[in-house]
């Protein structure tokens, strides 16, 4: 079964949510496993360095939680200290709408407001994808390497009225379906007491647990001794 998420991942016009599964820059398929491991370790160390607000080569729980708390506050439009399903959905839908608008404009080569199958298969030019999508060239190559049958299935999934053209209203419909699903999934994950609301404590509980797992010596800070050797060396570099 073709899903919204698989369709957009393969064809390069989906919501691009960064994850550990995404290939790291420079992580070529043919590179030795040890080199790929060093790239990933360097990225993780860089992530910790960004969390280290005071530059003391340690990350406190407060520093570790800062971005998650700020995200909660942005989503809590009502200011009642809890998130409902609509607020969770709105947080994803806004970013998705902007991304989809940019990608559709790049795919719509003749600017007639539609994306035809020919335009869809061709995709953005490599220069456009690289310049405007920060690493999109790899996704462009992945899409082009997908078989014609799969590309056809993905196009059919998005072409809701079956007229052979993708319109913005069809993008909106698929995006709404995804936002609804993501909202239900987020509620399932975060709403621990199943009361239909996500409190700040619920929203940050997994982040707190992750901090505890990383803080091997239990001193309340993530420091060099808590890290694997490669990450430790990368993080300690000036």
Image (cartoon, rainbow, N blue to C red):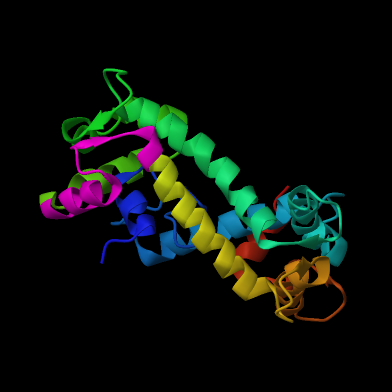
Q: x, y percentage for residue 29?
A: 30, 56
* Residue under the image location 45 percent in, 55 percent down: 177
Tell me: residue 25, above or below residue 167.
below
Residue range of the region highlighted in magenta in the rendering = 149-170
Q: Position of residue 197 (x, y in %)?
A: 75, 69
User: Residue 28: within the magenta?
Assistant: no
Query: Looking at the image, is 124 positioned above or below residue 91?
Result: above
Instruction: Pick whichever, 68 or 176, lies toward us.
Output: 176
Q: Residue at x 40, y 53 (%)?
A: 27
Q: Where, by quadrant of the figure, is residue 166 drawn? A: top left
For residue 26, say whether it is visible: no
Number of numbered callouts drawn: 0
Task: For the N terminus, give its image quadrant.
Answer: bottom left
In the rendered view, tell whether residue 110 sits above or below residue 149. above
Q: Nearer the viewer, residue 87 or 186?
A: 87
Question: Which residue is more in the foreground, 198 or 51?
Answer: 198
Relative to residue 219, is residue 154 depicted above or below? above
When asked about the image quadrant of residue 210, the answer is bottom right
Position in image of residue 229 (x %, y %): 62, 70
**Identity of the residue furthest to the left in this view:** 148
Q: Is residue 90 visible?
A: yes
Taking the image as shown, residue 113 lies to the left or right of residue 58, namely left
């Amino acid at each position: 079964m073709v899903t919204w998420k698989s369709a957009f991942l393969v064809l390069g016009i989906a919501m691009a949510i960064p994850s550990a599964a995404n290939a790291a820059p420079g992580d070529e398929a043919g590179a030795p496993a040890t080199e790929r491991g060093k790239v990933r370790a360097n990225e993780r160390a860089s992530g910790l360095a960004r969390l280290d607000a005071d530059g003391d080569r340690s990350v406190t729980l407060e520093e570790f939680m800062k971005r998650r708390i700020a995200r909660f506050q942005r989503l809590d439009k009502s200011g009642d200290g809890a998130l409902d399903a609509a607020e969770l959905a709105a947080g994803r839908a806004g970013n998705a709408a902007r991304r989809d608008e940019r990608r559709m404009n790049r795919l719509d080569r003749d600017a007639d407001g539609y994306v035809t199958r020919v335009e869809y298969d061709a995709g953005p030019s490599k220069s456009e994808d690289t310049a405007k999508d920060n690493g999109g060239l790899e996704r462009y190559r992945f899409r082009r390497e997908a078989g014609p049958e799969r590309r056809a299935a993905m196009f059919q999934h998005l072409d809701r009225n079956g007229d052979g053209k993708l319109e913005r209203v069809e993008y909106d419909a698929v995006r709404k379906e995804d936002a609804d699903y993501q909202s239900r999934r987020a509620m399932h994950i975060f709403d621990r007491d199943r009361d239909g609301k996500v409190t700040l404590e619920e929203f940050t509980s997994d982040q707190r647990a992750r901090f505890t797992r990383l803080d091997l010596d239990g001193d309340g800070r993530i420091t060099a001794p808590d890290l694997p050797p490669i990450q430790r060396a990368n993080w300690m570099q000036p």
